[in-house]
Amino acid sequence: MSAIVARGLRKRFGDVEAVRGVSLEVAEGEIFGLLGPNGAGKTTTIRMLTTLLRPDGGEVRIAGHDPARDPRAVRRVMGLALQEAGLDDLATGRELLALHGRLQGLPKAESLRRAEELLGRFDLVEAADRRVGGYSGGMRRKLDLASALLHRPKVLFLDEPTVGLDPAARSQLWTIVRRLNREDGTTIFLTTHYMEEAERLAMRLAVVDRGEIVAEGSPASLKAQVASSVVTLAFDADEALTARVAADLAKRPGVKRVLATPEGLAIHLDQEAEDGDALRAAAERAGAKVSATTVADPTLDDLFITTTGRGLRDAGEAPA
Amino acid sequence: MTGLASATWALAARSVRQYPRVPADFVVALLIPLFFFAVTSVTYASVARIPGFPTGDYALFFLPLVIVFAVFTSANGVGYALVLEVKNGYLDKLLALPIPRLAILLGRLLAVAARCMVQVALVLAIGYAFGMRFVTGLPGVAAVLLLAAGLAVAWASIGSFIALTTRSPEATEGMTILFLPLLYLTTGSMPLGLLPDGFRDIVVLNPVTYVIEGIRALLLDGWAAPAVATLPGLPLPAVPAAALAVVGFGAVTVTAATWALGRMDA
């Protein structure tokens, strides 16, 4: 049985179609990432999967349970850590975990024991009896995550788990998430707009843009779909010249596509790639004064640009 | 999965545990009504000598209004606490737990009821220390505490309703001031017979009037004291009329808050 199944999920807020027919399936024990810019519909999707938002259309099953028919059965098998890490600031860390254990259905003693265990596991023992209001961002995230785990959920949902964290706290959280998956076999569904996070954590990814899934697969296969390597040429030129250079380069063997970037051009190459120097020489023959050349493996950002025409980072702010 | 009773209890215990952590709330909710009581009962003491005034002790006559004032100021905090949890996302975490939703509301209402009983008991204890004696004794005091708890639940539910429907801390905070008309369009400071005609018509429609009259009966006039007005064909004494007013008022507001909580996933 799949841990998560969604078919044709739709949600509209007034005039905005936030989610437009999202279908996905996540196997038990998988770490699945939903990658997309801010405003792509990731949070709306995760809220519909976790009983917090009623979809306008479509079907969901979480470990076989239907949120529309039996939301409490879904809530029993899932854990949820949300983007804002909204917590009860007046509670201590230990109190908060013990309360969540009780509310997740554990007997009192078991709830306290699990709280203790998770405080130790997430390195929060020292802060356990301090009020949550005084916790750092990283500590809040860890406590938020721990509060979703008291009852050992089969499926764990993480909405932008590391937004706003410093690199050390981020990598610590990634380690925790991977361990949960490896040691406890927890299925993990996470949303992110960080490519690095998606690549490091997810076994399989769906790229979402404007409420629709535009690509799906393992990070490696998705990148391989884009190109075998990407050459970027930096030069100053007006639009006409840039277009002429791009058209020239596009005709060369092995060139899959040429994209304009703020710095110049990005050239996506097939397996039988030309090297960067040859492309630079060709661009200069066409009239561009190239100031820098880089050759790199394709990234998920390249994937995003080729599927949506926009960069992952700018897409959130770009007018629809 | 957790049942309604145990989830409500766990959530109420959380709120109660946290009250002393914001001592300012407690102090304000007690000091302001007491200050007000001290000033009013001293400056208006001679009002009790007006012909037609039912008692010679204005302070004791005025005490029910102070009790209700303390209840309102305490219960005002519930909506605000709830809207902050809507805003920061913690309510979502609670909604995603396998508990009946109603427990989230009932937990807060139970906690505020307990808190108001403590505060009102303190007000009565202070009155007692200053020589006030209550005609119905300890059972009457217990009944006053229950009326206070009921009114707290009713008023906190309005705050919760506003919190859940507007999701705006400003709106939730702003509406708390509405307790003032409810408090003053009553017989809290003057008996019905001495109020002007038009005012009297409004006062008998306000449920808080009946609560104040009921508390006053318990402190001053005894269990059998008649109500200021009752439903046609339902001639109840003041104390049951107060209970009925609290239950009726509460039924409407708790239903509204429950409805608002139920549509959080729309």
Image: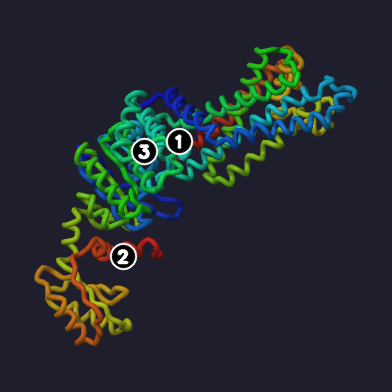
Residue B20 in the image: state x and y as whole percent: 54, 32
Q: Are marks 1 and 2 in contact (CB under 8 Å)?
A: no
Which amino acid, by three-letter code, is at mark 3?
Glu
Q: Earlier in the sequence, mark 1 or mark 3?
A: 1
Label 1: which secondary element: loop
Q: Earlier in the sequence, mark 2 or mark 3?
A: 3
Q: Identify the mark at residue A106; answer none if there is no mark.
A: none
Residue at image location 54% in from the left, 40% down from the top: B163
Vertical comparison of B205 with A168: above or below: above
Can see residue B265?
Answer: no
Horizontal side of B39 relative to B139 (left or right) equals: right
Q: Identify the mark at residue A126; answer none if there is no mark.
A: 3
Which amino acid, by three-letter code, is at mark 1?
Ala
* Residue situated in front as seen by the camera: A267 or B49: B49
Residue with the mark numbered 2: A311
Residue with the mark numbered 1: A91
